[in-house]
Image: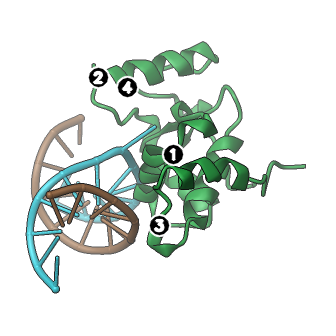
Chain colours: A green, B cyan, C brown
Amino acid sequence: MSPRKKPLGHLLRPLAAAGRDRRMAGGDSSALEAIWQIVCAIPRGRASTYGAVARAAGLPGRARLTGFALRVAPEELSLPWHRVVGAGGRIVFASGSREHREQARRLRAEGVPVVAGRVPKAALTELQEL
DNA sequence: TGTATGACCCTGA
DNA sequence: CTCAGGGCCATAC
């Protein structure tokens, strides 16, 4: 069985408690939840893209929202954010930045090769079949 | 209320 | 390969 609709409510509570719940994502947090869920579903040793995550979450054409969702994701979720890269497998963080190195390090740590700041297409997954 | 800014993407030149 | 232009849209100010 695929990992869908895992209850995130108990994990979202602390976010609300932090006072960040105010009608997020256009008065509906389901979009962010959906994105977080998809990111959680990216298998170890693989990577996907912002656009693909958005599509899999039922939000075609909204890659930016994926970026935003990761940006505001509560630490408690411990999302595998490093498995999300830009189109073509490119790490979007500025080359040389702390985040860029961190993402490359985490990816390599689970066997994903990072060459010239990008993940080979073979390691990418469309994850459209969730 | 309007403008600026992004962890983006795609097409075309 | 780079660059421009359009789409997308939540948040910050």
Closer-to-camera residue (A104/A126): A104
Compare marks 1 and 2 and give the one earlier in the sequence: 1
The answer to the question of whether label 1 and label 2 lie on touching residues, with beta carbons closer than 8 A, is: no
Looking at the rendered structure, the kind of residue marked 2 is: Ser
Residue under label 4:
A99
Tell me the subunit letter for badge 2: A
The answer to the question of whether label 2 and label 3 lie on touching residues, with beta carbons closer than 8 A, is: no
**Secondary structure category for the residue under label 1:** loop
Asked if badges 3 and 1 are on one and the same chain, I answer: yes
The answer to the question of whether label 2 and label 4 lie on touching residues, with beta carbons closer than 8 A, is: yes
Q: CA distance from mark 3 to mark 4?
A: 25 Å
The percent position of residue A36, horizontal first and vertical second, equals 61, 50
Residue under label 3:
A25
Left or right of A43 in this view: A116: left
Q: For the point 70% across and 56% down, which residue is it?
A: A9
The percent position of residue B4, horizontal first and vertical second, equals 11, 59
The answer to the question of whether label 3 and label 4 lie on touching residues, with beta carbons closer than 8 A, is: no
Compare marks 3 and 4 and give the one earlier in the sequence: 3
Residue under label 2:
A97
Tell me the subunit letter for badge 1: A
Q: CA distance from mark 3 to mark 1?
A: 12 Å
Tell me the subunit letter for badge 4: A
Q: For the point 41% across and 34% down, which residue is it?
A: A90
Q: CA distance from mark 4 to mark 1?
A: 16 Å
Tell me the subunit letter for badge 3: A
Left or right of C11 in this view: A32: right
**Secondary structure category for the residue under label 3:** helix
Above or below, comparing residue A103 to residue A54 in the picture: above
